[in-house]
Amino acid sequence: MTNKINYVDICCGLSWGDEAKGKIVSYLAKTGNYNFVCRWAGGNNAGHTIYKNGIKYKTHLIPSGIFYNICSVIGPDCVINKESFFEEVNYLKKNGFNTDLILISPNAHVITDIHIKEDIDKLHNSQGTTGKGIAPCYKDKYARKGILAKSVKEFEQYLWDEKLYGNILCEGAQGYWLDIIKGNYPYVTSSNTLPYSACSLGFPPQYIRKIYGASKIYDTRSGVDPFFSNELLNNKDLLKLIEVGKEYGTTTGRMRTTNWLNLDKLIEAINISGTTIIIISKIDVIEKINIYKLFYNFNIINFDDFFQMKEFINNKLKEHCNFLDKIIYSNSVELTNLE
């Protein structure tokens, strides 16, 4: 076995989370091309839905490489709720997956009951957090008074030696516009969602080969954000998107606020993230409701059909996105030709 890293591929969200990153990572992981699947930030405030052999599985913290017998790393900038972690481990064991492949960075931080209470009491309603204790845990981390995973006896068997080799796939949580720096502060998550943060796992950026950026053909947002006003929930066409697209959070079950695709924001997210391959999903949803709209240059643009809309998007992305090599469109179920 070599200790040499060959390359790193990264999958990140380009919107407000919920962009089918789990589906993309699942597609890539099942190719058998990777030695590790790594999560670099966040906690059990995120969620991935995976379909394997027609069966639906959900994880909230453990990387989805676990479904394909790949070493799955919870990275040093992640935060871990002990109870939730072991619930997921038992769930995976019950479903026949090898949980010995789960690895925890010794420098990940631990969410306590105090963090959860503070989140619920102070942030859950005002900022629409998931109430999982994420923000208070990160607050203690940066105040230098957090608890590290290596200090928790129950985590001993899962502690990672912090060595990577071979081919690495990094799995993002949330999305670009929830990033603590780039998002609509303070209506953001408490970690860095951009792909450069994956380097915290222990590799230099020179190893990054491909960046897969995930988006939907329309925008959705869980939680509170003035950019997604409550008035949107009075729009009958947008409510159709929610119904047909089944826009409910994997972690919370909350209905997501929905809007037409903001192409200006998508272009910025592609450029700053360095996305080389974009996967725009849920094409079948807008085809079912037969409404084709997007925002561009602060105006809403209507199209007669998806062909017109796709041509417009392709032209604008090719015009404005210098690093983008490939544009892929997919429906709610199938992905093809990502490599």
Image (cartoon, grey):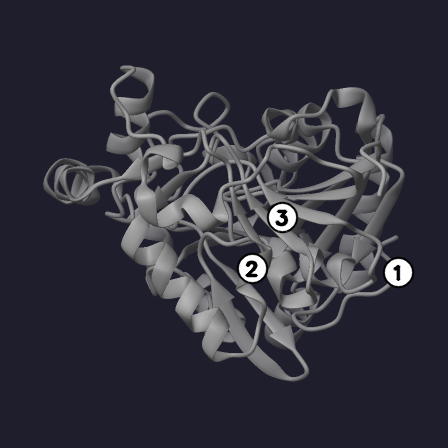
Q: Relative to residue 109, is residue 162 drawn left or right?
A: right
Q: Earlier in the sequence, mark 2 or mark 1?
A: 2
Judged from the image, the secondary structure of the residue bearing numbered disc 2 is helix
For discs 2 and 1, the disc positioned in front in the rendered view = 2
Distance from disc 2 to disc 1, alpha carbons, whole Å, reads 31 Å
Image: 297 above or below 301 = above
Residue tagged by mark 1? 337
Q: Quadrant for the N terminus, please.
A: top right
- Label 1 or label 3, whichever comes before in sequence order: 3
Q: Position of residue 41 (x, y in %)?
A: 49, 36
Q: Position of residue 5 (x, y in %)?
A: 82, 33
Q: Nearer the viewer, residue 220 or 86?
A: 86
Q: In the image, which is nearer the foreground, mark 1 or mark 3?
A: 1
**CA separation, marks 2 and 3?**
46 Å
Q: Residue at x 39, y 46 (%)?
A: 155
Residue 202 visible to the viewer? yes
* Mark 1 residue type: Asn
**Circle 1 SS class:** loop
Q: Amino acid at mark 2?
A: Asp
Which mark is first along the chain, 3 or 2?
2
Image: 312 above or below 331: above
| Amino acid under disc 3 | Leu
In the picture provided, is 314 more to the left or to the right than 248?
A: right
> Viewed as shown, does residue 244 lie left or right of 234?
right
User: Where is residue 195 drawn, in percent x and y?
Assistant: 65, 31
Q: Read off the residue under disc 3.
A: 294
Choose top left, top right, bottom left or bottom right for residue 206. top right
- Residue at image point 41% right, 28% down: 184
Question: Farthest residue in the bottom direction?
Answer: 54
Q: Which residue bears the numbered disc 2? A: 100
User: Is 76 left, or right, of 217 in this rendering?
Assistant: left
